[in-house]
């Protein structure tokens, strides 16, 4: 699934105009997603007539906005809100946009478990996989046919612990196996989703709201007598990345602007997580990766949980974990720590950095 250009104002305006035009004619788009859009050489979007269906409820605001937001997959929350306001203004409609967006996301993330324009359920290697058929390649299918073969000891093996086994594999991908070796863990997973399923859903959710995380490709559960014993997650491998702590530590004091920019990016990412209702009990330096171009990516989603609304107590608890981990970034000045917290507060749109700093310091 190719994401919508989140920061392109002109493309956003053209997309809003298209959706307003389609809805104004009394039509909805069947299974809306970026794959339904056709962009011509002049940057004008269109939708094939065959993908349009006549509907009587095109005037219901939250349903209409849901169509627009599905087409804006990967756009930032700010960009989606701006597009929604423009759409409502153009059609003379009113609704509580923030509430409508939360409802839309809650519904849309379930698409990854069903067959539609972007996802499908396939059988491979005697297992039933949920996969993204728009990115699934022949090389990936080889992995799905025999995932354990790629997790044998080799130069591509990255991690092999009691809980997880991780290795690079064909198709520029990373394969992760969650091992359930304890009886109580096997029993526990019969009453909840497997770790692979939860990670698959979380990653897709984060992509939807514009947070950079490795794109998930497929997941499956391996069951014996109806009980999950292992689960597998296939995702994109990020080449040429470094742990955020190592990158910041390597920057000298003469490269202060780059250090501040990296800390600001970390603050924005954590603020966006909390603002979108995600807590992260394992927020630490090693879970943030930096590319050569300076982009910050969030990895290892095991500690992430969606709460809809993150309380101030949970936010402080998450940030305290991060702040205690900051010494791994090297000796940080007061202004550098302040940059992280100030960027966080602007991103989450809640809280004063001075008050937050005092709360974190008071619990050290």
Image (tube, rainbow, N blue to C red):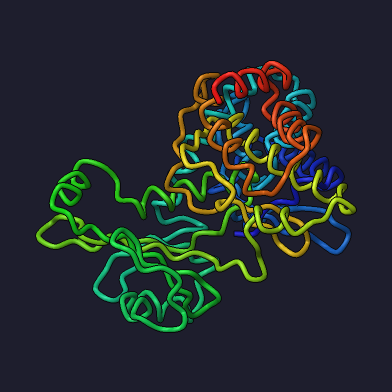
Q: Residue at x 68, y 43 (%)?
A: 266
Q: Nearer the viewer, residue 353 or 346?
A: 353
Q: Is residue 174 above or below residue 346?
A: below
Q: Residue at x 67, y 28 (%)?
A: 348
Figure label count: 0
Is residue 60 toward the left or the right of residue 349 in the image? left
Q: Nearer the viewer, residue 154 or 23?
A: 154
Give the percent coordinates (x, y) of residue 73: 63, 47
Give the percent coordinates (x, y) of residue 188: 19, 44
Is residue 103 toward the left or the right of residue 249 in the image? left
Q: Nearer the viewer, residue 282 or 89?
A: 282
- Name the quadrant containing residue 220: bottom left
Q: Does any portion of residue 259 appear in the rendered image?
A: yes
Is residue 229 toward the left or the right of residue 13 in the image? left
In which quadrant of the rendered image does the N terminus lie?
A: bottom right
Q: Residue at x 43, y 53 (%)?
A: 200
Q: Does any portion of residue 121 appear in the rendered image?
A: no
In which quadrant of the rendered image does the C terminus lie?
A: top right
Q: Is residue 144 above or below residue 181?
A: below
Give the percent coordinates (x, y) of residue 176: 40, 65
Residue furthest bottom as drawn:
154
Give the percent coordinates (x, y) of residue 101: 59, 29
- Name the quadrant containing residue 86: top right
Residue furthest left as drawn:
225
């Amino acid at each position: 699934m190719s994401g919508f250009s989140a920061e392109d104002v002109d493309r956003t305006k053209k997309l809003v105009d298209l959706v307003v035009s389609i809805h104004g004619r009394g039509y909805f788009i069947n299974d809306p997603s970026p794959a339904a859009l056709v962009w011509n050489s002049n940057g004008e979007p269109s939708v094939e007539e065959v993908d349009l269906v006549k509907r009587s409820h095109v005037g219901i605001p939250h349903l209409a906005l849901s169509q627009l937001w599905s087409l804006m997959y990967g756009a930032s929350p700010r960009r989606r809100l701006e597009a929604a306001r423009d759409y409502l203004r153009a059609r003379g409609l009113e609704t509580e946009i923030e509430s409508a967006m939360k409802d839309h996301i809650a519904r849309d993330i379930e698409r990854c478990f069903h067959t539609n324009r972007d996802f499908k359920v396939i059988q491979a290697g005697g297992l039933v996989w949920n996969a993204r058929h728009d990115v699934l390649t022949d090389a990936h299918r080889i992995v799905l046919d025999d995932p354990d073969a790629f997790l044998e000891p080799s130069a591509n093996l990255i991690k092999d612990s009691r809980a997880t086994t991780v290795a690079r594999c064909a198709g520029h991908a990373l394969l992760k196996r969650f091992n359930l070796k304890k009886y109580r863990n096997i029993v526990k997973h019969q009453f909840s989703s497997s770790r692979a399923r939860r990670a698959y859903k979380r990653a897709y959710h984060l992509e939807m709201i514009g947070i950079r995380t490795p794109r998930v490709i497929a997941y499956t559960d391996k069951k014996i007598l109806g009980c999950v014993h292992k689960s597998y997650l296939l995702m994109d491998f990020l080449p040429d990345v470094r742990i955020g702590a190592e990158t910041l530590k390597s920057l000298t004091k003469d490269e202060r602007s780059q250090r501040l920019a990296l800390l600001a990016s970390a603050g924005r990412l954590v603020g966006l997580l909390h603002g979108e209702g995600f807590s992260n009990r394992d927020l630490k330096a090693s879970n943030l990766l930096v590319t050569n171009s300076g982009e910050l990516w969030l990895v290892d989603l095991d500690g992430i949980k969606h709460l809809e609304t993150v309380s101030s107590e949970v936010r402080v608890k998450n940030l305290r974990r991060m702040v205690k981990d900051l010494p791994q970034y090297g000796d940080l000045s007061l202004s550098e720590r302040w940059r992280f917290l100030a960027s966080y507060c602007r991103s989450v749109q809640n809280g004063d950095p001075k008050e937050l700093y005092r709360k974190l310091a008071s619990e050290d």
